[in-house]
Amino acid sequence: MSDNNPRLEGPLPPAALDDPHLQPATKNPDRMQALAALAIVIGMAGFIGFIWVYWINASTQWEAAMLTVGMAGLGIGTIAWGKYLMPQGPFVEERHDFHSTDDERTAFNAAITGRGGLEVKRRGLLLSLFAVGGGIMTLALVVPGIGSLGPKPAKSEDPHGSTDESLFTTNWRKGSKLVTVDGRQVQVDDLNLGGVLTVFPQGYEGSSPDQVILIRLAMLGPGDPPYPIAPPGHTEWGVQGYVAYSKLCTHLGCPVGLYQEQTQQLVCPCHQSIFNVNSGAVPEFGPAPRPLPQLPITVDATGQMRANGNFDQAVGPGFWERP
Ligand code: FES
């Protein structure tokens, strides 16, 4: 097989710093450096803007816009630096014997040292800006990661009651009025047999952790014996044929809103967990690991339906500190 590439006989010639191949591709390096620096500064402003709009909980469109400015600014500055301010080349090294002579090594070291020293000295500003911009970009990625970890768990016996940071408690209290999402107070004769209604504690209409599904299993009056449901001890948690369960699925937290009257089952639409209402909303099918927590309810003298306490356990799916 023929080899058309000439082999060098002697040592490599040292690279001269004024070699045209070592010059930047742009005719005006200072101007290009200023433009690259400007792009990086704009990128830094974009990342700072992203942290700010995340912090004040602005819209995701603003977050996306700020991230775009940050990424584009840093990217354009880096590309301009690499494309126009680095030695333009092309660099061709002829094939030669693999073994280098001492003179070749010396010449190579001199070329690299001289070239590197020249570039680092000239682009110190860009290096500094790039380092600061990269740090701000890292901050912009870390802040939402930490800020989006979710609420901190609080103890159910927290004397200050439930807070937005609590995973253990809800806003239900003994005496809370049952109201609909638009604030209408629920009366004991509002539902017929098999009827269902989503209710909230008054003052927290629409609150996701507090949503409860109210079901009428029997048309009982105030003097009738309580409707028997399991588990033992929970019979008194219903009133006049009504029972109430947390609407948050214990699998992944979807609202369990489908009620099959004939079988008295609640169905979660997300992964088809089925809860038996008559046996304390125990899951009979699907991935839900535990029953829907039951809310004790009662009726006051005016017929207004009220909570008779809070849930006896956390609502929704499990989490890391959950017993
Ligand atoms: Fe209900 Fe998965 S969220 S079954």
Image (tube, rainbow, N blue to C red):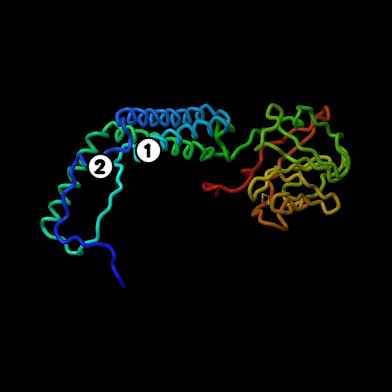
Q: Position of residue 64 (x, y in %)?
A: 53, 34
Q: Quadrant of residue 104?
A: bottom left
Indicate which disc residue 170 carries: none
Label 2 packing within 10 angstroms: few (<14), some (14-19), many (20+):
some
Quadrant position of residue 246:
top right
> Could you say where residue 241 lies in the image, as x and y percent from the top left?
83, 43
Left-right relation of 164 to 216: left
Residue sitting at x 82%, y 50%: 260
Q: Is residue 29 left or right of residue 311?
A: left
Residue bearing mark 2: 22
* Label 2: which secondary element: helix
Q: Position of residue 53 (x, y in %)?
A: 51, 28
Give the labeled residue for mark 1: 78
Q: Tell me: 65 left or right of 266.
A: left
Residue placed most toward the observer, 17 or 270: 17
Of all residues, the one furthest to the left in this rendering is 102
